[in-house]
Amino acid sequence: MTTDLHQFALASIDVAVAELGLDDWIREVLHQPERSIAVQVPYRGDDGEIRLVPGYRVAHSTARGPAKGGTRFHPDVTPEEVAGLATLMSIKTAVLDLPLGGGKGGVTVDPKQLSETELESLTRSYTRGIAANIGADLDVPAPDVGTGERHMDWIAEEYAAVTGRPNPAVVTGKSIAAGGSLGRDSATAAGCRTVLLSSAARLGLPADARVVIQGFGNAGSHLARMLAADGLRVVGLSDSRGGLHDPNGLDVAAVCAAKDEHGSVTAYPAERVSDRDLLGLDCEIVVPAALEAAIDETIAEEIRARLIVEAANGPCTVSADEVLADRGVVVVPDVLASAGGVTVSCFEWQQNLYGERWSADTVATRLEQRMAEAAEALWAVADERGLPLRTAATVLGLGRIADAVIERAGQRPAALVS
């Protein structure tokens, strides 16, 4: 990602502001993060030398609650990228009607080049740098690219050491032992499943609709198993080494077993297809669950599905959206389809705040209900205003944020979007 992501987020805000007829001062508020910090992150290498890398944390909006968003360790992290991601997180939490705002953080480093000891030193140092700007009622980090539950455990421990106030609600995505939530591992897939099934039913697709899933990581693999259990036919799958196709439906359990044993879905005996050809297979539903910008305008022309559900972040380019809209292909945007993770993160935060431990069934039930309600609200805005779902999502989210901003400013709530 680059500066383009931030510009895309700001352009999306402008479209929603115009659609909602908001005042210019609200647009200016939404264009600027509430808080943005840059820190130097020193960490000790295994050779004993101290190295220094830049880190960032941005809180775009806390109008609806504490900022919420991941922390990524990646060599391409920039302040512009973090600002754009924080802005989009504000919209995502508002679309799901969570009592949270939007934030994001990152360190410009390649975690693959660091040992476990170096990663811990880096994570704890970064936490010390941002400790005054995070907290359970201020800004709540989570995992993202290059980080996971061990990093979140380190953040929670270091925050407690720095502040003298142990509080597991300062960060989500922790291990279960450290206060993490049951159901977090499959949350993105479970949320995507709910949205996919409701959208397919709305479009009148068959109960055994054919599905292609690009990407077989955490979200893609869990989703494939769930949809196969629902009776849908997963006719195409891929990971970073290649893709598979079976027009009658792949044996998802056997594909998972092959990947576990050999490291790739391509170990399963089926027709091999390229990642590009995979997206053009004959099917009703395509789920991009891998890379950003995986579907450009050229690939969009080749897609034969009626429904695309974005389990990955930003898999369709702006030009692809235009082509797909012209061809009548419905795209359920990532801001909703991939929101299961942040929703269960919210549940983890709530459990930590109140000292509760919800069962896996309780988490699953509440997640399904929240995703279904958000999908219904999104379709209602799209139908009422005649908007594509992606634009409708921004309008829905920004309307809710604007109401909170207006209330905070001491003016009468706008009640722009229910």
Image (cartoon, rainbow, N blue to C red):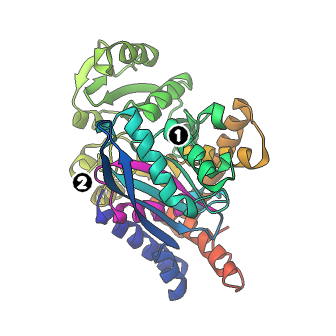
Which of the 4 image quadrants contains residue 181?
top right
Query: Mark 2 highlights which residue?
Result: 297
Any magenta on residue 133? no
Q: Nearer the viewer, residue 409 or 380?
A: 409
Please give left or right for residue 410 compared with residue 396 in the image.
Answer: right
What distance separates the C-alpha of mark 2 from that of mark 1?
26 Å
Query: Mark 1 highlights which residue?
Result: 188
Q: Nearer the viewer, residue 181 or 278?
A: 181
Report the quarter where the N terminus lies.
bottom left
Magenta span covers which residues?
66-92
Name the residue at 50% across, 87% down.
24
Which of the 4 image quadrants contains residue 248?
top left
Amino acid type, label 1:
Thr
Report the quarter where the C terminus lies.
bottom right
Q: Position of residue 240 (x, y in %)?
A: 28, 31
What number of labels is visible?
2
Name the residue at 36% across, 64% down.
79
Q: Position of residue 296 (x, y in %)?
A: 25, 51
Q: Is 386 situated above or below 333?
A: below
Q: Position of residue 54 (x, y in %)?
A: 34, 58
Please give left or right for residue 215 compared with residue 387 in the image.
Answer: left
Q: Nearer the viewer, residue 199 or 348?
A: 348
Between circles 2 and 1, the one closer to the viewer is 1
